[in-house]
Amino acid sequence: MTDRPTHLDDSGAAHMVDVGAKPATMRRAVAGGRITMAAGALDAIRAGNAPKGDVLSTARIAGIMAAKRTADLIPLCHPLALTSVSVDFTWESGGIAVTATAATSGPTGVEMEALTAASVALLTLYDMAKALDRAMVLGDIRLIEKSGGRSGDWRAE
């Protein structure tokens, strides 16, 4: 193994890593984040009274679509044939938590797809509710766990 960063070639130029020789394995990643907002905005979303309509359904679809387009958004990401993507929401005091899960069977992981899904779902929550609260805060976006591949399983502490 080399000490050189994996996305740089011998001349130091950025390149996409060749994963062609790596075995296909089942891979799964879970990412999450949260958005905090004023009580009135949270109540309107929960009641289905937000001005732009069904906030959670729209954010779920946006997150799933974003996972499928990750390679178009993040330089040097491999386009993946995702086998599943889910985006779920949990009501919290003062906000909503988002959990996104992505899976594939392939030679490279799906961490970026799960993170992209969670991030875009949060951005969509903001967009759908900004008329109610422009001071919403998105945060705590992170990888929660991953499985599969050469590095095996990992879970955040």
Image: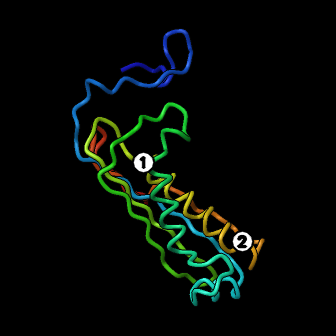
In the image, 1 versus 37, the foreground residue is 37
In the rendering, at what x and y percent does residue 21 appear? Answer: 25, 24
Q: In what quadrant of the picture does the C terminus appear?
A: bottom left
Vertical relation: 1 (above or below) 76: above
* Residue type, label 1: Glu
In the image, 32 versus 89, the foreground residue is 89
Residue visible at 49% across and 56% down?
Answer: 117
How packed is label 2: few (under 14 Cα within 10 Å), some, or many (20 or more)?
A: some
Residue that mark 2 sits on: 136
Q: Describe residue 10's horizontal placement relative to residue 135 as left or right.
A: left
Q: Count the marks: how many?
A: 2
In the rendering, at what x and y percent does residue 35 appear? Answer: 62, 70
Q: Describe residue 146's horizontal placement relative to residue 16 as left or right.
A: left
Res. 92 image quadrant: bottom right
Vertical relation: 61 (above or below) 82: below
In the rendering, at what x and y percent does residue 85 appear? Answer: 37, 58
How packed is label 1: few (under 14 Cα within 10 Å), some, or many (20 or more)?
A: many
* Residue type, label 2: Met
In the image, 6 versus 85, the foreground residue is 85
Q: Describe residue 55's horizontal placement relative to residue 17 as left or right.
A: right
Instruction: Label 1, secondary structure: give it.
Output: helix
Residue visible at 46% across and 51% down?
Answer: 67
Residue visible at 40% across and 58% down?
Answer: 30
Residue that mark 1 sits on: 111
